[in-house]
Image: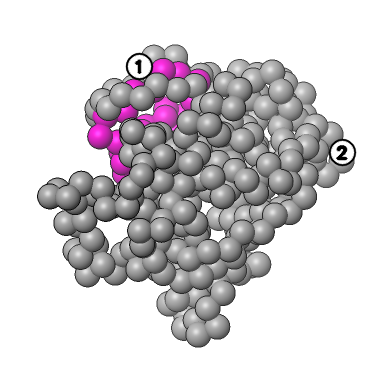
Amino acid sequence: MTLSGALNALKSSSLISWKSSGRLQQTIGRYVEVSGNGLHSGKASTVRIWPEYAGKGRHFDFQSKYSIPASIDFAQQASPLCTSLSTDGLRVRTVEHLLSALEAAGVDNCRIEICNNDDNVDSEAEDSEIEVPILDGSASGWVDAIEEASLVVAVDQWGNSSEQLSPYLNEPVPAIGRQWFSIAPFEDSSYIKQIASSRTFCLYDEVESMRNMGLIKGGSLDNALVCSASEGWLNPPLRFLDEPCRHKILDLVGDLSLFARLGNQGLPVAHIIVYKGGHSVHADFVRRLNESFV
């Protein structure tokens, strides 16, 4: 697709302008497979990431029957502890770490297949929901899988490549907050070195209440940092002194990737300042950008 054709396929507004990133859309060179347990469900699943045509973007293949695009249009309104995508009664939970790695690594187009590994799962209710494995609580496992597969230029069904576009913010968009760590995720290997390995975290005093809510069933000291008000970190050492703050950036990149469309970049080209960020706040921010087209 030519640059003019790509621009015509996307809407711009007074808030957002789509501009060339200077590269072609990419996909992975071959399929990769990663298995693990879900943080909240505790259930084992296998994720297979497949190459995809240019312009198709990133999407989840549900039961080989349904497709859920990794788009803000499918993000649930209230998911404070994770980002979930849903449509027609189907839901994919905890997508943020995987999407963060895909966005930062430049995997613009891919098909993500998730299979439940639990042979005992046979009820209609359980079949309607799947969760991305938490791995070690960071994005490193996903980054490693992407690097193993390598990247290639994506082409469409007719063998044509497409210019990759980036959304540029034209004016400030207020958001809650401030906690400082500054990074340009796409410069050199800064995401891999400074963000990808930062793990998810929680407060020890909140663990029991979250489990009573049916959450973090797969959570452990192996895939999450746990902090006690009286004893400090229960599973040191931290990979960085400010690892929790860096993980917030990891989550942010994954959530902002939901602004991606047609195989183009999701993360806005802007100076983004986040204070006390969370998945709900991130999703509201992306919805604000999305609504500028209406």
Secondary structure of the residue carrying tag 1 is loop
Residue 275, position in %: x, y? 26, 29
Give the amino acid at mark 1.
Pro
The alpha-carbon separation of the residues under discs 1 and 2 comes to 39 Å
Residue 266, position in %: x, y? 53, 33
For the residue pair 45 and 87, the one nearer the viewer reads as 45
Q: Residue at x 60, y 51 (%)?
A: 59
Label of residue 159 in the image: 2
Residue 225, position in %: x, y? 33, 50
Q: Residue at x 68, y 42 (%)?
A: 147
Give the amino acid at mark 2.
Gly
Say whether residue 184 is left or right of residue 252: right
Residue 170, position in %: x, y? 44, 14
Say whether residue 139 is left or right of residue 20: left
Which portion, as a residue range, is magenta? 268-294
Count of all numbered marks drawn on residues in the image? 2
For the residue pair 210 and 286, the one nearer the viewer reads as 210
Q: Decide if residue 294 is in sight here.
A: no
